[in-house]
Image (cartoon, helix red, strand yellow):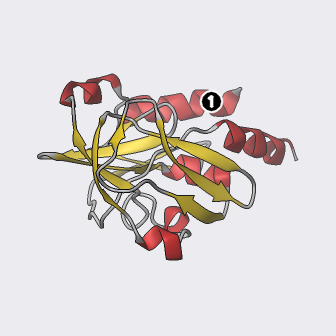
């Protein structure tokens, strides 16, 4: 019961971001001991529970496995149009689940070059494949140095464990 109440309050507090277009990830997984979630090597993470994979001139963005797990079944994803601008920490969309609706925040600034249109018809991809099919937007980063302000896999894992203990 306490976990269910915590999950509901956490879902309300989560700030999430999105990414578009299918990207294949093959990095190793870290298991979060208390979170029952996975964290991937090769990605950067925001404390608002978004992930970023930066490849060349493109950064793919989505919400983490930890975030989708606490949200529960995702029933709707609201994404912006390509061509718009996002600012690091600013909202660009929303994820609605059976538990709550949460804003999605941009982990980095830049121009949105693609959105994952599959999520409008199949929002559950955020749950079943948060790091691959469930990505939300792709961004052309305005300032790649912003990636240095994000958490690595080990730091994000520790952040989630500390968050779980409160």
Left or right: residue 90 compared with residue 60: right
Left or right: residue 74 compared with residue 87: right
Left or right: residue 14 compared with residue 145: right
Residue furthest bottom in the image = 121
At 65% across and 57% down in the image, what residue appears?
96
Q: How many marks?
A: 1
Residue 88 visible (yes or no): yes
Residue 37 visible (yes or no): no
Q: Nearer the viewer, residue 129 or 114?
A: 114
At 68% across and 59% down in the image, what residue appears?
97
Q: Nearer the viewer, residue 91 or 7?
A: 91
Left or right: residue 126 compared with residue 133: right
Instruction: For label 1, count other residues whose C-alpha is less than 10 Å away and answer few (under 14), some (14-19) or many (20+).
Output: few
At 46% across and 33% down in the image, what residue appears?
90
Label 1 sits on residue:
163
Residue furthest right in the image = 1
At 71% across and 26% down in the image, what residue appears?
166
Q: Position of residue 95 (x, y in %)?
A: 59, 54
Q: Position of residue 39 (x, y in %)?
A: 42, 46
**Helix, strand or loop for disc 1:** helix
Q: Is residue 68 above or below residue 12?
A: below
Q: Position of residue 3 (x, y in %)?
A: 79, 44
Q: Position of residue 104 (x, y in %)?
A: 52, 44
Q: Is residue 127 above or below residue 8?
A: below
């Amino acid at each position: 019961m306490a976990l269910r109440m915590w999950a509901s309050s956490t879902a309300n507090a989560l700030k999430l971001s999105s990414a578009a277009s299918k990207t294949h990830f093959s990095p190793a997984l870290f298991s979060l001991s208390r979170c029952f979630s996975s964290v991937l090597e090769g990605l950067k993470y925001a404390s608002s529970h978004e992930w970023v994979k930066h490849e060349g001139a493109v950064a793919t963005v989505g919400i983490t496995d930890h975030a989708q797990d606490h949200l529960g079944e995702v029933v709707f994803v609201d994404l912006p149009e390509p061509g718009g601008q996002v600012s690091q920490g600013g909202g660009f969309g929303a994820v609605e689940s059976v538990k709550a609706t949460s804003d999605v925040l941009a982990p980095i600034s830049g121009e949105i070059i693609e959105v994952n249109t599959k999520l409008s018809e199949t929002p559950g991809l955020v749950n079943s494949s948060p790091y691959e099919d469930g990505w939300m937007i792709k961004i052309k980063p305005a300032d790649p140095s912003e990636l240095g302000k994000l958490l690595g896999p080990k730091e994000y894992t520790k952040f989630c464990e500390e968050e779980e203990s409160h």
